Image: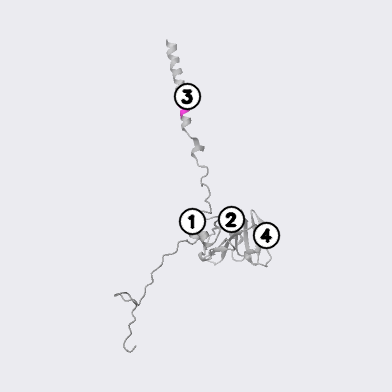
Amino acid sequence: MIRHAAILPVLVLAPLLLTACGSEKAGDPGPSASAPASAAGPAADPGTGELASRAQAMGVAPELVYVTDAPGFTLAQQSVGVLGDDGFSATWVDGETNALLRLAVDRGTITAGTCPEQPVGDMSGEHTTCERDGGAWYRTGAGRHEYALSEEGHVVRVSAETDAVPRDVLRAAALAAHRPDAAETDALLPSVEPAPATPVERGDLPPYGDGAPDNHVDVGG
């Protein structure tokens, strides 16, 4: 009786322990099931949303809209516009030196064979030198220098006058070029909604009657 009393609780508890462990594993989704596939999530489609509507209103292809960041430089809002058929162009200004940093995005490609044939900063007829710098091309010509990066079906270029913007600043601005997020889109592209009309105050309207202009002529006039 003593031997059976010692063994039976173990036999009874064993299935209960196995059942408890099994149910705990089944109910626990584990780290891979609860964690998202990507912390940032999928990239937004450039053909939809606020970016698309604002770009298309300007005549710019949404996928060709880029923005960059360079310390000391501020976007010149009036410079934002169309490049070529549906490309994009914008200029940033150094508040202290007034140096200009131009971002231009247009369709096409750039290779070792075509690089010397493409003028820097749209200065046609000038000699262009090309130097490979990592994944980009460093190009000089006509007193300007430029970094050009080949993307899918288009080229992103950041250029400036050679004696106004150092090469390392130019390179950093080119590598910082990216498609804008919602806040950057709002600051970069003009709104498609027209500004509300401001009523014009007319000084010749009397404050009484039907509001017709006062055309009264004095005696002798």
Q: Is residue 200 above or below residue 58?
A: below
Q: Is residue 44 above or below residue 119?
A: above
Q: Which residue is mark 3?
A: 18
Please state which amino acid type lies under the numbered disc 4: Cys
The answer to which quarter of the image holds residue 116 is bottom right
Pointer 4 local density, CA inside 10 Å: few below 14, some 14–19, many at least 20: some
Residue range in magenta is: 18-23
Does dot 3 land on a helix, a strand or a loop?
helix
Left or right: 204 in relation to 60: left
- Precedes in sequence: disc 1 or disc 3: 3
Specify whether residue 73 is in view: no
Please state which amino acid type lies under the numbered disc 2: Leu
Prevalent SS, magenta region: helix
Alpha-carbon distance for marks 1 and 3?
A: 56 Å
The residue under the point 65% across, 61% down is 139
Q: Nearer the viewer, residue 112 or 52?
A: 52
Q: Which residue is mark 4?
A: 115
Q: Residue lying farthest bottom?
A: 220
Q: Which residue is mark 1?
A: 50
Q: Which residue is mark 2?
A: 175
**Which of labels 1 and 2 is toward the front?**
1
Position of the C terminus, as image quadrant, is bottom left
- Precedes in sequence: disc 4 or disc 2: 4
Pointer 1 local density, CA inside 10 Å: few below 14, some 14–19, many at least 20: some
The residue under the point 63% across, 65% down is 122
- Precedes in sequence: disc 1 or disc 4: 1
Does dot 1 land on a helix, a strand or a loop?
helix
Question: Can you give x and y, in whole percent of width and height, for residue 203 in the image?
Answer: 35, 76
Is 105 one of the magenta-colored residues? no
